[in-house]
Amino acid sequence: MKNLNNLSNKVINEIYRDGYSIVKNVLNKKKCNDIIKHLDKLEDKEANNKYHTDERSKFGQVVIRDLVLRSPKHFLKLIDNNLIIKVLNKVFKEPSILDNCMASKTTNVNKNYFGLVHIDSHLPSYSNENTSDIVACYCLDDFTKENGATKVWPKSHLSGIRIQNSKNYSNLIKKKNKYVEAKKGSIIFFLGQTWHQIGKNINNQRRWGILCHYKRWWIKPSTEWTKCGPSIYKLLNNKQKELFGFNSISPEFNLKKQYKNLKTLRKSSKLSKNYFKVIQY
């Protein structure tokens, strides 16, 4: 526990100072390779799915969202990693929820590459204490400048600028930036308001990563995790239920009794094991 405290404090000091932090050796190589096998299968499956929306492959990025719904047994354990939860608790000082858990792979598309410099937060912030989003990126391969390592703008998290919507975008992105090169098995933490951009793959080397994006509990996530259904719900531990938002569903007004609970937050340990049998949507 002491080592976890020290490591989480180191991460927080660095993300507060620079907007990002790298932690090595979170996953071993075997675990990384096992996850990559599942991602490769999902990528093939998506290619044959007529309903799939190809977001960015022609620009150099393969994206697979909602991993914990597509294959919960393979990806659920990534979202409540002890170090990640420790960092979230210390920064937010209140419960957090999962915004998304998605895979990202860079590909070499030569001159067709395009990556918008952006922030993941809906709202930029001038202060660390008021950050609303934290992202943890698992590096399943080595992240290098040549294979598309994430590019960040150090200290941009304190700019208060949502760069992708700035009228001065072209000039602002000329400021000092850096490729976040990290070894296989590392986690890259960054605040949601840190300017970043997916790198350009120029050497055709594989670069898979998984992005776990977290928000304060009262912000709406990009996926309605509470509609996951009973089979996935049964797989969730209490922390995962909290990250899915089961302990922060807006209270319903009972028309018959003319009554509702006044508080939204509740303890995840109090949630029914038969939630989907007693709650109707």
Image (cartoon, rainbow, N blue to C red):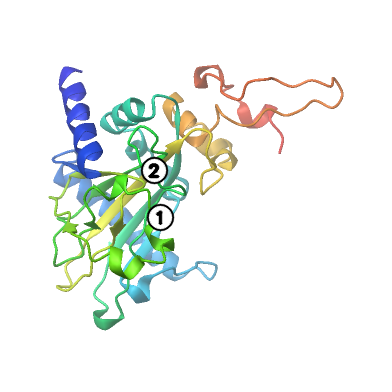
Q: Quadrant of the N terminus?
A: top left
> What residue is rendered at 43% in x and 25% in y?
94
Which quadrant would residue 99 be assigned to in this image? top left
Residue 80 at what x, y percent from top left? 35, 33
- Among all residues in the image, which is located at the extreme bottom? 111
Quick check: 231 left or right of 108?
right
Residue 178: x %, y % from top left = 16, 57
Rendered position, 70 above or below 79: below
Q: Is residue 199 above or below residue 216?
A: below
Q: Secondary structure beneath disc 1?
A: loop
For label 2, the crowd category at 10 Å Cα-Cα, with few meaning under 14, some 14 to 19 and many 20 or more, is many
Relative to 101, is 22 on the left or the right? Answer: left
Question: Which residue lies under the disc numbered 1?
Answer: 162
Report the residue at 38% width, 44% height from top.
Answer: 213
* Near-viewer residue (189 or 241): 189
Can residue 37 be seen from the camera position used here? yes
Q: Badge 2 is on which residue?
A: 125
Apparent side of residue 85 relative to residue 238 in the rendered image (left or right): left
Asked if one can make out residue 115 in the rendered structure from this viewpoint, the answer is no
